[in-house]
Image (cartoon, grey):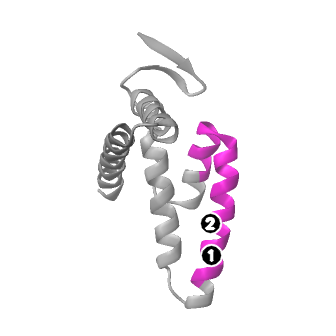
Amino acid sequence: MGSETARGTVGHDQPLFPTPPLTEKALRDALSGIDPAESVRFDAEFHRASHEALRTGSAVPLHTCLFRWAVFVELRSCRRRADRLRELEGIVGGASDADAARDAAKEAAQMIGEAAQRVGR
């Protein structure tokens, strides 16, 4: 069964939107569709990365920032994946059992690694 989003009707396992390119504008646009507050955080982090790049003469801070936010977007581009990540974050944040927190953190780390691989292609 599909669900209505601002970007159209999609299935639970289908991407909510196409994977954006690793550019400032494309990521900002994707983030504003996911959560405007995250778009503000992206702008602040990108601004800091730009200053660090100018200070050091290296583009690495910019590439790192863009990659990190591309992974963030990728993790939230599929409703099922986004829901599971939120669930895992809740488990880690509210766990009174260290094993439950560790298992949830391990699964979240695996999800992040897989998203990073997809972004890196």
Quarter of the picture holding the N terminus: top left
Amino acid of disc 2: Phe
Contact, mark 1 vs mark 2 (Cβ under 8 Å): yes
Residue at the image position 64 percent from the left and 48 percent from the top: 38
- Residue 115 lies, in percent from the top left, at 35, 48
Residue 10 relative to residue 109: left or right:
right
Q: Is residue 91 magenta?
A: no
Give the magenta range: 28-53
Q: In the displayed orientation, state which residue is furthest to the top.
A: 1
Vertical side of 101 occupied by 68: above or below: below
- For disc 2, the neighbor class at 10 Å (few under 14, some 14 to 19, many from 20) is many
Q: Quadrant of residue 21?
A: bottom left
Q: Is residue 43 above or below residue 95?
A: below
Q: Position of residue 80 (x, y in %)?
A: 40, 27
Tell me which secondary structure the magenta stretch mostly adopts.
Answer: helix
The residue pinned by badge 2 equals 46
